[in-house]
Amino acid sequence: MKSKLRGLMIGIIVSILITGCVEKTQQDESSVNTSTSLFFPVQKYTNPSVRMTAILEGELVQINGCLRVDKYLLVWPYGFSISTNDEVIQINNNTGKPVAIVGDKVILGGGEIPGDYIANFSRELPSSRCSGPYWIVGDVSADR
C-alpha cells in the first residue's frame, strides 16, 4: 500500500513539474519578438533592480540579422521593439517613440554581461544565432 501511494505521489509531482515546464516554455516563446527576421533580444524585467552605468559609443549596425555596436550584441530594455520601413531598421522605446536607426552613431548606457549570466537577463539568450559578448542596454542616445 505504501509503495502504491508513493508511486502515485511521484507521478503527480512529475505531472505538475512537466506541466509547469510546458507552460513556462509557451510563455517565454510568446514574449520573443518575431515581427521581423532580425534577432531582437529584450530584457526580462520592466524595472531591473540593478542599473549599469557604463557607456558604449559607436555605430549601430546589423550583421547577419544581429544588432550590434562594436563587438557587442545588444539586449534592449523591456518593451522596446523594432520596425522596418523601406529597409530602414528603427528601434522604438516602450512607448513606441523612435530612439535610433541602424547606421546611427549611438551612445548606450548599460553594461557588459558575461555569457554565463545572460539567461538571467533575457529569455532569448544565449542563442546560437547571435553570439556575445552581450551589452545590457539602459539609456539610448543617437546622433542623426
Image (tube, rainbow, N blue to C red):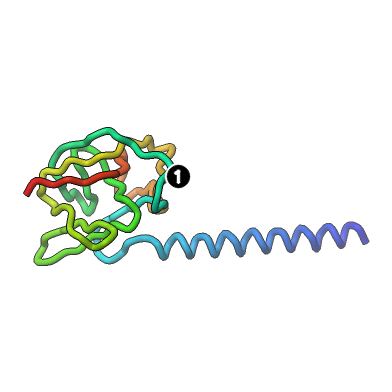
Q: Nearer the viewer, residue 100 or 24?
A: 100
The residue shown at (32%, 58%) is: 79
90 with respect to 112 (left or right): left
Quarter of the image with the N terminus in it: bottom right
Q: Nearer the viewer, residue 13 or 121?
A: 121
Q: Is residue 50 above or below residue 28?
A: above
Judged from this view, the residue extending furthest toward the right is: 1
The residue shown at (22%, 37%) is: 71
Displayed quadrant of residue 38? bottom left
The residue shown at (9%, 66%) is: 86
Q: Is residue 42 above or below residue 20?
A: above
Q: Residue 11 in the image: state x and y as whole percent.
A: 74, 62
Label 1 CA crowd tier, 10 Å (few <14, some 14–19, many 20+): some
Judged from this view, the residue extending furthest toward the top is: 54
Q: Residue 29 in the image: state x and y as whole percent.
A: 42, 62
Q: Residue 91 in the image: state x and y as whole percent.
A: 20, 56
Label tally: 1
Give the amino acid at mark 1: Asn
82 with respect to 118 (left or right): left
Q: Is residue 13 above or below residue 127?
A: below
Label 1: which secondary element: helix
Q: Which residue is mark 1?
A: 120
The residue shown at (21%, 36%) is: 56
Q: Nearer the viewer, residue 35 or 3?
A: 35
126 with respect to 6 (left or right): left
Q: Is residue 14 above or below residue 137?
A: below
Displayed quadrant of residue 111? top left
